[in-house]
Image: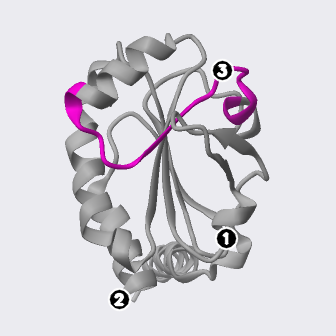
Amino acid sequence: MKRRDLITLAIVAILIGGGLALWLAPEEGLRPAPEVSFQTLDGRTVSMEGLRGQPVLLTFWATNCPSCVREIPHLAELHERYQAQGLKVIGIAMSYDRRDHVEEMVRAREIPYTIAHDTNDAAALAFGQIRLTPTSFLISPQGRIVYQKLGDIDWSLVERNLERWLG
């Protein structure tokens, strides 16, 4: 082999090895979810600290966001499939969304998972000044953000993690 071929092969091996190391890295290296609390539509207070020990799929959404509305059935399906095993699905309506619009959407779409209304932007600020929807976070049982996505969620990635944590 020529020297140039050996160098190219070494670089490719390093890149593949680095990618594998990141893929298999323990969750301890990931960003912790912020310690924030929020009110659900039914008046309960939910805290991220209180959810420690179970996986959480949290999405910031708005009633006037077509992508947000499209993901409701997927979120409901995950909720139904994994809630008994400990998954907590939470939709946080943005502060600019009127409460009566949020409540009507929950009723009309028969949303089965927890819905909160971020009236003072505390949750949106805690998670990184969220302004665009949908913005979703998959949080491990250890309280680490393992996946963050603006726009359409990679459902297979979410399910792989849930199977690993709950299977």
In the image, 58 versus 22, the foreground residue is 58
The residue identified by callout 1 is 52
Q: Quadrant of residue 39?
A: top right
**In the image, is residue 64 above or below residue 139?**
above
- On the question of residue 159 being in view, the answer is yes
Q: Where is residue 124 in the image (x, y as percent from the top left)?
A: 67, 31
Query: What's under tag 1, amino acid-wise?
Result: Arg
Query: What's under tag 2, amino acid-wise?
Result: Gly
Residues at badges 3 and 1 in contact (C-beta under 8 Å)?
no
Q: What stretch is highlighted in magenta?
A: 108-124
Residue 148 in the magenta stretch? The answer is no
Quadrant holding the C terminus:
bottom left
Q: Where is residue 63 in the image (x, y as percent from the top left)?
A: 36, 18
The residue identified by callout 3 is 119
- On the question of residue 32 being in view, the answer is no
Give the colour scheme of this rendering. Answer: one colour
